[in-house]
Amino acid sequence: EMPALDVVSWNSLVSAFLANRMFDDARRALVGMMGSGVPVSVASLVSVVPACGVEQEQGFGLALHGLALKAGLDSVVNLGNALVDMYGKFCQVEASMQVFEVMPERNEVSWNSAIGCFLNSGLYGDVLAMFREMSERGVMPGSITLSSLLPALVELGYFDLGREVHGYSIKRAIDSDIFVANSLVDMYAKLGSLEKACTVFEKIEVPNVVSWNAMIANLVQNGAETEAFRLVIKMQKDGEQPNSITLVNVLPACSRMSSLKTGKQIHAWSIRTGLIFDLFISNALIDMYAKCGQLSLAQNIFDLSEKDDVSYNALLLGYSQSPWSFESLNLFKEIRSAGIEYDAISFMGALTACTNLCAFKQGKEIHGVLVRRLQSNHPFLANSLLGLYTKGGMLDTATKIFNRITEKDVASWNTMIMGYGMHGQIDVAFHLFDLMKDDGVDYDHVSYIAVLSACSHGGLVEKGKEYFSQMRAQNLEPQQMHYACMVDLLGRTGQLTESVELIQDMPFHANSDVWGALLGACRIHGNIEVAQYAAEHLFELKPEHSGYYTLLINMYAEAGRWNEANKIRKLMKSRKVQKNPAYSWVQSGNKLQAFLVGNG
């Protein structure tokens, strides 16, 4: 016959279950212990109470607190600490503080548990206040205290105080403690201090996965994507396996660098390790593929994965900026069918799609929904509405929306300048450009694209040259699109020789936007020789783009130069270039359907 278990045996059994993350078994063992008549000890409760917080078992946690009170064990400091921590994890700040305040004795762990409670609930000011009270009471803060304090200081924007804490940790020789160091790396990452973060990271003797992730995130956030990729490789060489957070940190770098190959390697690795089933990973992959223009791959992952609002929004935004914008509107309808609420990103993607499709009726319907939800003045959504109405030539409506925006950003101004210029109201565009500066909003590169486009639409060459020169005075170096605007402006007015000279004087090689502007100008003025020169570069830069071939063929045909036209047709055929299909779309029931123009 098996002897009855004593309190030590029961506690060992409970601890073993908890060590193996078998909470339900640990709970049953504790209940069995009480049922067998063995009195519950402090050790029994101290092991299970924190686990209740982790597992969010509020009912059982409250029952254990009641049991501790009944047994008179609540005055024991270790159990009090566990209860403060448990209520903190439940985000029950008041209950946590009630336990903390009545504790007859407190140690460093007590204060750390209270600080952790405030941190977990996002009460960052209270974290700092509790830390100050702790110091005033003569309790020496340790590594756990500082590692909890630093994230709160980051959220409060108290970076100077964060640096002081770093200095204090150096004096105490705990700056290389893994918890403190990880918090410091994260702090300097968010401060944008790459060098400081690297210095802290390199002092960590044995970085853990949190250390690596913080440093990788730091590099990505500060535009050092290549270094981030290298660190992921080094991490594995040093024996630490990337986890889901690592991949979520590094995948945005793939899209920013248009590094599709690296993105696919990460995708393959996530499949091999089973991380592909993690919702955060699948969402990051959808976003990466969508931003790299690989919408079929993004759609495949979306179809095979668990979905939330982020999944829908990532794919919706991807489609909205592509030739398949109508798919965004279908997804927009699916969101509600899936029981997910629209948010600002959903609306922004749908409005962008409506703008690209010239689906102004549907755009107005979405605007109506935003008005009813009192969201039409949201900065991003207001800017999306400006884009919709300016493209549709509804400038009065756009102006009303613009005037209601209390905090106009650079995108708001740029959209209005572009819209008025596009529709021939050049003087209004120039007036808005001047008002923008008066409003204290600095011009950016897009501002000058907008105003140069207005000059081009109005044929105002000298005015365009003035703005082009003004850019450098604003410390804005002209980019490809600015040169494309100037080539278009000069070309429209027949100054093709000057357009060519401008291209030849560019400080970098002209891209397809610039050469395309020149080719378009040649089409207007029938200059085949310069058109050939532009087309040679375009066929090299965009050999798969059928529009350039077609334009040159038409120019040859109009000039009766059939042999040259046939040569270009043969070149298209040898390169297997096909005309880009033109889509038409209609609404069928609740779904938008796309049709190839010309299909029977």
Image (cartoon, rainbow, N blue to C red):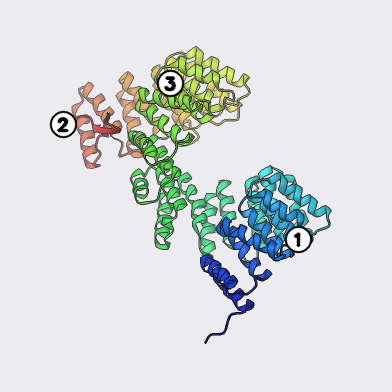
Task: Tell me where residue 224 appears, x and y as whole percent.
Answer: 56, 49
| Amino acid type of the residue tagged 1 in the rendering | Glu
- The secondary element bearing badge 2 is classed as loop
**Image quadrant where one finds the C terminus:** top left
**Closer to the camera, 505 or 71?**
71
Residue density around tag 3, few if under 14, some if 14–19, many if 20 or more, within 10 Å: many
Element class at badge 3: helix
Q: Mark 3 and mark 1: span between their CA atoms?
A: 61 Å
Q: x, y percentage for residue 228?
A: 54, 54
Query: Where in the figure is residue 525, as x and y percent of width and height?
Result: 33, 18
Q: Residue at x 51, y 64 (%)?
A: 241
Q: Nearer the viewer, mark 2 or mark 1?
A: 1
Disc 1 target residue? 108
Q: Is 50 displayed left or right of 308 in the figure?
A: right
Residue 316 located left or right of residue 572: right
**Count of picture labels:** 3
Res 127 seen here: yes
Q: Of callouts 3 and 2, which one flags the residue occurring earlier in the amino acid sequence? A: 3
Residue visible at 30% across and 20% down?
526
